Image (tube, rainbow, N blue to C red):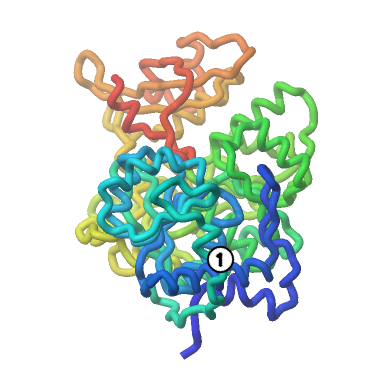
Amino acid sequence: MENENAAIWFVDRHLEEGRGAKQAFREADGAKRTLTYGQLSEETARFAGALARHGVRREERVAMIVRDQIEFPVVFWGALKAGAIPVPLNTLLAAQVYEAILNDSRASILVVSEPLWETVKPAIENNRYLRAVLVIGDAPEGTESYGAFVKDAEALPPAEAHGDELAFWLYSSGSTGTPKGVRHVHSSLKATADTFGRQVLGIREDDVVYSVAKMFFAYGLGNAMSFPMSVGATTLLFSGRPTPDAVFAIMADEKPSVFCGVPTLYAALVAEQEKAGTAPDHTIRICTSAGEALPREIGERWQKLWQAEIVDGVGSTEMLHIFLSNRPGDIVYGTSGLPVPGYEVRLVDEHDEDVAEGEVGELLVRGPSSAEGYWNRRYKSRDTFQGHWTRTGDKYERTPEGRYVYCGRTDDMFKVSGIWVSPFEVEQALIEHPAVLEAAVVARADEKDLVKPAAYIVLKEGLPAPTTEELKELVKQKIGMWKYPRWIEVVEDLPKTATGKIQRFKLRETK
């Protein structure tokens, strides 16, 4: 049997093809360390050897609470080489969430970046499964340093694996509840590179990629690892918060050619650049956006300033990356574009019947990167993964041109006067006002217990605040008389997941 361990194609293949000295990863902060493809191959083999020396067996979980630094790809691909299951976790969670996930996954090894230790420490006090805790940096009492763990370990060849064998888990962002362990197989990584990475993004060997979305997210994992490593490109790693100032500095100093962002950040960058009144300093040839639908207004303003298209699309942890997307040279901002080659989508009603053009339906998708299921969530797996099709929980409508327009999450949609209202549509209308930076819309009952839209907005600094009536009138003119928000509240910020998705359920709780 051919060994289909994903680490062979993504890591070791580059040595055979002459890219051993090519820079694979470069840190854009801290010590600004670098890692070539040759070094990555060697270090991942040694990490695999260290796991074996420690008695880690096939399919044991290796939990990762690791920032975007060069140890991240070493641990991830090294675990794959050992036949173990790397489980990258969100580095922004609270201790009680880490405790729940570590117990749920039953990870036997935990790798932690030193700056995160104080948050993680209380999460493992009562853990019965961990045999070793490795800290990247100075190791506190009761832990082992990552460096000591791998020192003098034997370099092992990649364990034999089938393409359909479990490779890694990702925990869903938990925007609507407890995070779920999403299990992916070896072949899914190459599937996303062969589809979106090659046929839509057009990733090239000479590209330098900077992904604002961190590598523990499905979106960031593809942007910063699968896609650049599929062609031997270089990835910039930044462990800090992607503030506008930090992102502008990376664009100017590190010269990325591919920029992968999220709608919230694009809005902030556009606002800052317009306030500066100058042209941005950058070398970006193409951008991507996912995590939440990109408002048309933001996409158009960005392209005018940066002279670079944003390829906006939709993906999910369950499908590993983007499966519905606009394409370079064929961008229609305000839509999620067309199915990525290799994927099929359907829009269905509550009876799973296909809806007509222009009608709102739930988006179903099938393609080569669908997850194997959820860990310890059999009934949820059956609800989400139905035969070849995966339910996304997103509501969409299809235009006469065949493009798909995002309407909201299934549980975010509501009816006003018997007509469906998309929160996203109202939000797009609100942010067309020059003083509005962000908006979120939820359903709220009025004094007659009838459901109407309620809006929460974040204003831009330094501009006159609009009146409530002015904003209501704007929405009426843009999208319809009945869709305007009956209540509008100005807030300092909106509740979001670490991927930038607005947590509307939290706003519904604050009536």
Which residue sits at x=51%, y=31%?
428
Q: Which residue is mark 1?
A: 151
**Residue at the outermost front position:** 141
Determine which quarter of the picture holds residue 488: top left
Residue 372 x %, y %: 34, 67
Q: Residue at x 43, y 74 (%)?
A: 52
Residue 300: give x, y in percent of width and height: 65, 36
Residue 24 place in picture, x, y as percent: 68, 62
Q: Does residue 287 show up?
A: no
Tag 1: amino acid:
Lys
Viewer-closest of 359 and 94: 94
When asked about the image quadrant of residue 45, the answer is bottom right
Q: What crowding class fits label 1: few (fewer than 14 Cα within 10 Å), some (14-19), or many (20 or more)?
A: few
Q: Position of residue 39 (x, y in %)?
A: 66, 67
Q: Nearer the viewer, residue 213 or 361?
A: 213
Q: Is residue 310 above or below residue 234?
A: above
Q: Is residue 159 left or right of residue 503?
A: right
Q: Residue at x 29, y 42 (%)?
A: 177
